[in-house]
Image: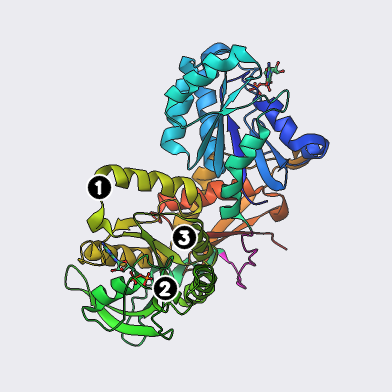
């Protein structure tokens, strides 16, 4: 499954109808599978060539009025936390109701990526409602008719680029470790390994050609050791640069920066260049501990940028997104807001990762970049004690218990941090293969928030006991 889509909205807008349509004949099978909880249905969805997990906040219809608001809110929040993308559904025949506004508010505050759909929009009777849906401020609504299967190609168009971003997440095996509960006495308090002259912090600066990678590295170095220029055609060999980058507080980070194809500019043909830089970026990413994705403020978040950022996340690197050429940006405040929104929308898998604006040309913002790199590195090295983790796990289990496949509850017994760089956690449980991906995501998102690890590519493995 590439991603999880939650269908949210007030009762009767048509969520289940869409759920059934997306899940289709597999529904019979789905019923036998563990639901996320009793109130949330989870199914394997299919839309043209897309395969994903869909969550439906079913079961609300049976609720009496006075408890409805609270339950609806909790259920929706849970679904939102478990999902990568939320499909917010309103009823175009009814128009926007106060309850819809409550939902919109939850989604704005909590969801990584929201797609708005005005359902029951077959026929002209729905036109007014569709137009009203714009007022939610969640973008253009998709005109949908779940019942008649209309608007699904629009939904597909919205989902496809996101599916790309989530595609082919590397299947990872849990590290070989023996987990015991009394591990706490060991190196749990161990200090974060800071970079030294012998082991400098490995940084890769990646990004599309002309985003300003060479200029940035030159500026950091403070000398013209690399060639830059507007014309593609200057030949350089791929190298890494060893240097000490002095930070805003005079702190020195011994650093090794990996050069990428943008600095080489071997190919004259644009197409070739792009292929080259993806391959080179890939190599640099594998070497790096922290990956700086350098965007051009004028053309941020292009396919190539998204691909490399996603790759860095999948490779388990700490990621810092830097937006370059900030000096020529006129309306900085509006642009920054825009960038943050795009970031959340297009790279939800990096939720919380730092976004800094820089000017490689003038050197402005480099202190911020320095701080962000160090901080990302620190988070990437973070270790949480087993005692802390288990207190936390108990709370998470209580808030949202795991599902009960065939009436048998999955027991999550305890957890421990198996590795750092990036942080990896193992949860010992009764039926590791039955824990839905969405429940793991709930735990991962929780770890990020509660242990202050924004943007960290956290890994989580479910393990059985034998
Ligand atoms: P939920 O409570 O949000 O899951 O809503 P349901 O899927 O149960 O649908 C509520 C009602 O709306 C049902 O009677 C559906 O048949 C109807 N419905 C769902 N989608 C559409 C649609 O696209 N057009 C029309 N006219 N009715 C729909
Ligand atoms: P690379 O291909 O990513 O290494 O990009 P370069 O460093 O060669 O920069 C490409 C072009 O963008 C050059 O013309 C640079 O002078 C220009 N450039 C780089 N950084 C900045 C910046 O911060 N502001 C402005 N205005 N231009 C920049």
Would residue 65 be seen by someone viewing this image from the given angle?
yes
34 with respect to 342 (left or right): right
Looking at the image, is mark 3 or mark 2 earlier in the sequence? 2
353 with respect to 81 (left or right): left
Identify the element where label 3 is drawn: helix
Measuring from the top left, give residue 312's x and y in whole percent.
49, 65
**Quarter of the image containing the C terminus?**
bottom right
Q: Main secondary structure of the magenta part?
A: loop
Residue under numbered circle 3: 305
Marks 1/3: CA–CA distance: 21 Å
Of the pair 145 and 458, the residue shown nearer to us: 145
Measuring from the top left, give residue 415's x and y in whole percent.
55, 58
Question: Which residue appears at 62% of the width and 73% of the height?
Answer: 176
Disc 2 beta carbon < 8 A from ligand 2?
yes
Q: Is residue 229 above or below residue 357?
A: below
Looking at the image, is mark 1 or mark 2 earlier in the sequence? 2
| Residue bounds of the magenta highlight | 168-180
Looking at the image, is mark 1 or mark 3 earlier in the sequence? 3
**Foreground: disc 1 or disc 2:** 2
Question: Which residue appears at 35% of the width and 88% of the height?
Answer: 198
Residue under numbered circle 1: 332
- Quadrant observed for ligand 1 in the rendered image: top right
Residue under numbered circle 2: 262
Would residue 392 be seen by someone viewing this image from the given angle?
no
């Amino acid at each position: 499954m590439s991603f999880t889509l939650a269908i949210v909205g007030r009762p009767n807008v048509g969520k289940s109808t869409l759920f059934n349509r997306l899940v289709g004949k597999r529904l019979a099978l789905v019923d036998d599978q563990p639901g996320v909880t009793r109130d949330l249905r989870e199914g394997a969805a299919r839309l043209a060539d897309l395969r994903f997990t869909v969550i439906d906040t079913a079961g609300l219809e049976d609720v009496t009025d006075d408890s409805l608001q609270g339950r609806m809110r909790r259920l929706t929040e849970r679904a939102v936390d478990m999902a990568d993308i939320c499909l917010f559904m309103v009823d175009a025949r009814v128009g926007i109701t106060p309850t819809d506004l409550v939902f919109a508010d939850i989604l704005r505050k909590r969801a990584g990526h929201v797609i708005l759909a005005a359902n029951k929009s077959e026929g002209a009777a729905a036109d007014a409602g569709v137009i009203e849906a714009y007022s939610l401020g969640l973008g253009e609504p998709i005109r949908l008719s779940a019942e008649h299967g209309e608007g699904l190609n629009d939904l597909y168009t919205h989902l496809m680029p996101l599916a790309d971003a989530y595609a082919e997440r590397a299947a990872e095996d849990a590290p070989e470790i023996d987990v015991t509960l009394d591990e706490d006495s060991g190196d749990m308090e161990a200090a974060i390994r800071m970079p030294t002259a012998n082991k400098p912090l490995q940084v890769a600066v990646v990004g599309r050609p002309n985003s300003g990678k060479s200029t940035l590295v030159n500026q950091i170095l403070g000398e013209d050791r690399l060639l830059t220029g507007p014309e593609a055609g200057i030949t350089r060999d791929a190298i890494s640069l060893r240097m000490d980058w002095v930070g805003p507080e005079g702190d020195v980070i011994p650093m090794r920066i990996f050069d990428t194809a943008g600095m080489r500019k071997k190919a004259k043909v644009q197409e070739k260049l792009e292929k080259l830089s993806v391959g080179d970026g890939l190599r640099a990413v594998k070497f790096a501990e922290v990956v700086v994705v350098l965007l051009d403020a004028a053309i941020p978040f292009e396919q190539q940028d998204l691909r490399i950022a996603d790759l860095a996340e999948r490779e388990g690197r700490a990621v810092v997104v830097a937006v370059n050429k900030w000096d020529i940006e006129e309306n900085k405040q509006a642009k920054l807001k825009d960038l943050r929104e795009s970031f959340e929308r297009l790279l939800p898998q990096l939720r919380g990762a730092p976004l800094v604006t820089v000017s490689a040309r003038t050197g402005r913002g480099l202190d911020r970049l320095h701080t962000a790199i160090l901080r990302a590195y620190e988070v990437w090295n973070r270790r949480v004690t087993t005692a802390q983790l288990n207190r936390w796990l108990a709370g998470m289990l209580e808030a949202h218990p795991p599902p009960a496949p065939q009436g048998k509850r999955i027991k999550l017994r305890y957890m421990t941090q198996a590795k750092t760089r990036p942080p990896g956690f193992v949860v010992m449980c009764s039926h590791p293969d039955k824990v839905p991906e969405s429940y793991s995501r709930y735990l991962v998102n929780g770890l990020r928030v509660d242990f202050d690890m924004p943007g960290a590519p956290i890994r989580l493995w479910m393990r059985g006991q034998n």
